[in-house]
Image (spheres, rainbow, N blue to C red):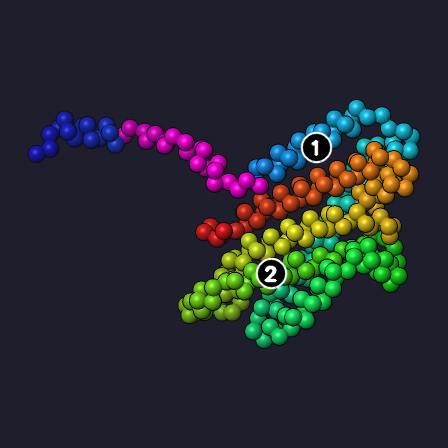
Amino acid sequence: MTTVADESARVAAAEEPVQPPRGGFRRRFAKVPVDVWFEPLVIIVIGVGFVIWYQRTTFTETESASMSWPALRSTILDHIQLTLVATVIVVCIAIPLGIALTRPSLKWLNPIAINIANIGQAAPAIGLLVLFTFWLGTGFNTAVVGLVVYAVLPILQNTIVGLRQVDQRTVEAARGIGLSGARTLFQVELPLAVPVILNGVRTALVILVGTATLSTFIGATSLGTLITTGITLFLPKLLVAGAVLVALLAMAIDWLGRLVELAATPRGVS
């Protein structure tokens, strides 16, 4: 028989706050991928080192023309603009094309499209830019076209691979419960393929950040201007500054892409 004392003890035990298990934060931290927290640490260390070097270095008049903060900021923004515009165009071309090439009616075009994209990736980036210069002239638009052709392959290939690896039994189950082909694509196939597709986008972004430095040879402003000026005039400070800034920009964009990839990946999909 339950006594009043037993009932009171039970109620008191139920009302006691539950203490979180020790080491909970440590376990949650261990679940975070290493690159998510380690890469920003590297970026911060290199960035702080660059800022300290920038503030303590005395530049010549020629170096100051490129290394003054207004000029440097304008160069960095031009480089980012060039990269982002090319990325948006590549994504708008490669992902829909990759989706189309995984549909049964267009699978026969898959080898042709991949081989054409391989040509753009295999050709030297500077060669592509020069060839497009003969056709389109110099400047920003020509640089964007060359970068788009050069960066299509990673996103196109990852889109195809990501959609192909979706378990066909899952697709058949979705169709079996009455989903149309379009709903199955957008509600089942694409969410499951997101990690692979976004990994291709990250790869293309890093490629574009590095390759955009070559656009300076065809009249488009980028951080490559600092590098080429440093080489041409034998100004090591400009060369180092350009190289470090390109590396920092590439790592920062890669890290942001990783965060987007983690946020967009459905739970349970690694």
Estimate the x, y position of residue 85 in percent, counting from the top left: 74, 52
> Which mark identifies residue 24?
none
- Looking at the rendered image, the quarter that the N terminus falls into is top left
- The stretch of residues the image draws in magenta is 15-35
Decide: is 179 above or below 229: below
Q: Quadrant of residue 86?
A: bottom right
Estimate the x, y position of residue 108 in percent, counting from the top left: 62, 75
Tell me which amino acid carries mark 2: Thr
Residue occupying image coordinates x 59% and y 63%: 160
Give yes or no for residue 28 being in the magenta stretch: yes
* N-terminal label among 1 and 2: 1
State left or right for residue 58 relative to residue 181.
Answer: right
Whether residues under marks 1 and 2 lie with C-beta atoms below 8 angstroms apart, the answer is no
Decide: is 34 above or below 129: above
Residue occupying image coordinates x 64% and y 45%: 254
Give yes or no for residue 109 being in the magenta stretch: no
- Local packing at callout 1 (Cα closer than 10 Å; few below 14, some 14-19, many 20+) is some
Tell me which amino acid carries mark 1: Gly
- Local packing at callout 2 (Cα closer than 10 Å; few below 14, some 14-19, many 20+) is many
Q: Which residue is mark 1?
A: 47
Between residue 123 and residue 145, name the one nearer to us: 123
Whether residue 168 appears in this view of the structure is yes
Q: Which residue is mark 2?
A: 159
Estimate the x, y position of residue 126 in percent, counting from the top left: 82, 54
